[in-house]
Image: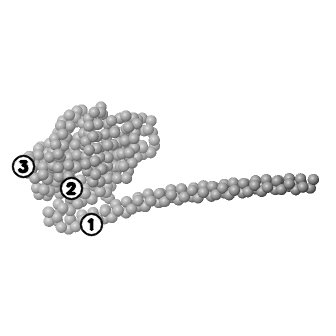
């Protein structure tokens, strides 16, 4: 799927405001926007749509979409090193999703278990990660539908599990899972990408090389040349090229990574500068309003003082005139 084009379409519909009149469509739109920004690592926009989806789901009392917002928020917290808080929120979101009547409940649960597997694996909690893999497989087998091919989806499950077992050092189980992965029909470089860790750990470098190049072509066709997804892929590509002895290619990828990182830094700096400028403008507007209000207040106070003085001297003059008139009489 071309997530960049999909995002443009979702944003166009969102800006039109037409979806707001249909609660279910609007919730689905917010969820797609949130999930696409998550995949593309657009942090600032992601937080905005998490918040908006959460507010809308609470207002509509829709547990499924509330679970989607909470799970994504939990992932971001874990990524930003609030690990236990993030995991707790993700597990709570899974329980919420399980209790919902959402028609794609098991599809969502498959994704949640895969994400939790990755989080546990990154934390070195391999037993917990394997438990998520087994739950993911159960959810896949529950998915029903005319166009559903569970065996193709299982290919993704086994790709993740093989890499997990390889990282855990459980070589025999990892190899068996790798064999099961190869037996599953279908598959493409996007579905198969999680197998890369297994291939690199057990030095299947040529297979890893072919998979990386296929995925690289997809990102280029989507014009996703300057992104965190591309940096991650090129980092792996440089490692594999180096292992194959292609030093020039490895160096080329390292240079590409530097170029993209610089570009992302500039983009982020520009974004932060724009945000800062807007804040400065807002503060300046507030200061100007405060100056005007203060000036009006001072003028009002001066007016009141002068009015009091005029009243005082007017009364005093009247009193003096009355005394003089009495004396003359």
**Closest to the observer, 65 or 243:** 65
At x 26% / y 35%, what residue is drawn?
98
* Element under disc 2: helix
Label ID, residue 212? 2
Q: Position of residue 214 (x, y in %)?
A: 22, 53
* Element under disc 1: helix
Q: Position of residue 223 (x, y in %)?
A: 32, 55
Q: Nearer the viewer, mark 2 or mark 3?
A: 3
Label ID, residue 255? 1
Q: Position of residue 30 (x, y in %)?
A: 37, 42
| Residue 256 horizontal side relative to residue 239, left or right | right
Q: Residues within 10 Å of mark 1 (few under 14, many from 20)?
A: some
Q: Position of residue 179 (x, y in %)?
A: 10, 46
Rendered image quadrant of residue 70 = top left
At x 24% / y 32%, what residue is drawn?
145
Nearer the N terminus, badge 2 or badge 3?
Answer: 3
Regarding residue 187, the answer to whether it shows in the image is: no
């Amino acid at each position: 799927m071309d997530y960049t084009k999909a995002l443009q379409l979702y944003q166009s519909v969102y800006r039109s405001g037409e979806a707001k009149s249909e609660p279910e469509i609007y919730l689905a739109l917010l969820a797609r926007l949130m999930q696409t920004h998550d995949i593309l690592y657009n942090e600032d926009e992601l937080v905005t749509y998490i918040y908006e989806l959460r507010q809308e789901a609470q207002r509509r009392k829709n547990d499924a979409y509330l679970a989607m917002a909470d799970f994504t928020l939990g992932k971001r917290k874990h990524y930003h090193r609030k690990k236990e808080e993030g995991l707790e929120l993700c597990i709570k979101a899974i329980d919420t999703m399980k209790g919902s009547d959402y028609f794609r409940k098991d599809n969502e649960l498959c994704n949640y278990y895969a994400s939790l597997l990755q989080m546990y694996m990154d934390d070195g909690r391999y037993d917990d990660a394997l438990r998520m893999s087994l739950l993911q497989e159960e959810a896949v087998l529950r998915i029903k539908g005319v166009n559903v091919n569970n065996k193709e989806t299982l290919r993704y499950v086994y790709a993740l599990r093989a890499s997990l077992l390889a990282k855990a050092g459980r070589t025999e189980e990892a190899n068996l899972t790798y064999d099961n992965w190869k037996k599953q029909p279908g598959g493409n470089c996007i579905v198969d990408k999680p197998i890369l860790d297994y291939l690199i750990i057990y030095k299947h470098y040529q297979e890893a090389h072919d998979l990386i190049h296929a995925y690289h072509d997809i990102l280029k066709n989507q014009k996703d040349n300057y992104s965190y997804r591309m940096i991650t892929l090129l980092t792996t590509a440089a490692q594999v090229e180096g292992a194959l002895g292609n030093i020039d290619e490895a160096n080329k990828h390292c240079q590409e990574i530097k170029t993209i990182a610089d570009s992302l830094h500039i983009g982020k700096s520009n974004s932060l500068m724009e945000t800062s400028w807007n804040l400065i403008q807002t503060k300046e507007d507030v200061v100007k309003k405060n100056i005007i209000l203060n000036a009006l207040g001072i003028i009002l106070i001066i007016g009141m003082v002068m009015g009091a003085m005029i009243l005082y001297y007017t009364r005093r003059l009247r009193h003096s005139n009355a005394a003089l008139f009495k004396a003359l009489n």
